[in-house]
Image: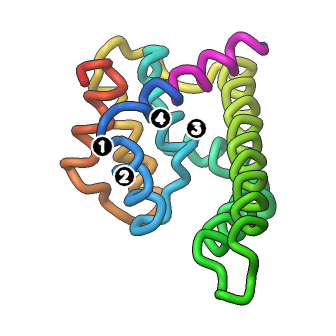
């Protein structure tokens, strides 16, 4: 399963590297409560020609919720806090600590993606769907599960990035 989880990670790195995508993902995270890894998973699953149901998405969200709450978010909070510590703290030392935490946060996200990809392949979730409409549907269902609507410009940008159009 390592190559399957690696393909999700590589897909995510490629999509996330596209112009505007990091800001779009952070907006979904900070303003809409989205887990960026789940957003990327919705796109990757569609790239695998799969359309997920609300139940499938609920399973994925449940699978990673504890990891997100107990590992990824605390690392993110610490990293963000260290971006501008109080003046009493040594800038050089806190910057070095922040860099180590950022590395750990990224590794925690990679591990989360590995679990998600392995679950996807082990449980054959999703309906076969060769259309790119699967990405749109997956994102809409995920947003609905959060009780939000993702902004159309962000969804459009993410779909273009996933289709390698930007």
Residue at (24, 20) in percent of width and height: 165
**Vertical position of residue 95 compared to residue 51: above or below:** below
Mark 3 in CB contact with mark 4 (< 8 angstroms): no
The residue lying at 45 percent from left, 35 percent from top is 16
Dot 4, how many residues are within 10 Å of its Cα: few (below 14), some (14-19), or many (20+)?
A: many
Task: State the extent of the magenta-drawn residues as a range.
Answer: 2-12
Quadrant of the drawing holding the C terminus:
top left
**Disc 3/disc 2 C-alpha distance (Å):** 27 Å
Q: Give residue 23's mark.
A: 2
Disc marking residue 56: 3
Foreground disc of the pair 3, 4: 4
**Judging from the image, what secondary structure is the residue with disc 3 in?**
helix
Q: Looking at the image, which is closer to me, 101 or 63? A: 101
Q: Would you name the residue on which mark 4 appears? A: 42
Task: Say which of marks 3 and 2 sits in front.
Answer: 2
The numbered mark, 4 or 2, whose residue comes first in the sequence reads 2
Q: Is the Cβ of the residue at disc 2 closer than 8 Å to that at disc 1? A: yes
Q: Nearer the viewer, mark 1 or mark 4?
A: 1
> Is 65 positioned to the left or the right of 25 in the image?
right
Label 1 residue SS = loop
**Residue marked by disc 1:** 20
């Amino acid at each position: 399963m390592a190559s399957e989880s690696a393909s999700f990670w590589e897909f995510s790195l490629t999509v996330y590297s596209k112009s505007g995508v990091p800001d779009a993902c952070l907006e979904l995270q900070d303003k809409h409560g989205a887990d960026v890894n789940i957003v990327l998973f919705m796109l990757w699953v569609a790239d695998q020609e799969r359309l997920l149901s609300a139940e499938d998405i609920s399973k994925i969200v449940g699978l990673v919720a504890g990891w997100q709450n107990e590992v990824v978010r605390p690392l993110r909070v610490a990293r963000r806090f260290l971006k501008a510590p109080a003046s009493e703290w040594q800038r050089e030392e806190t910057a070095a600590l922040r860099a180590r935490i950022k590395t750990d946060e990224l590794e925690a996200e990679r591990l989360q993606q590995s679990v998600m990809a392995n679950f996807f392949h082990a449980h054959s979730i999703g309906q076969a769907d060769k259309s790119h409409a699967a990405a749109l549907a997956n994102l809409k269902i995920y947003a609905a599960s959060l009780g939000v609507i993702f902004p159309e410009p962000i969804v459009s940008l993410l779909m273009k990035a996933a289709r390698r159009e930007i």
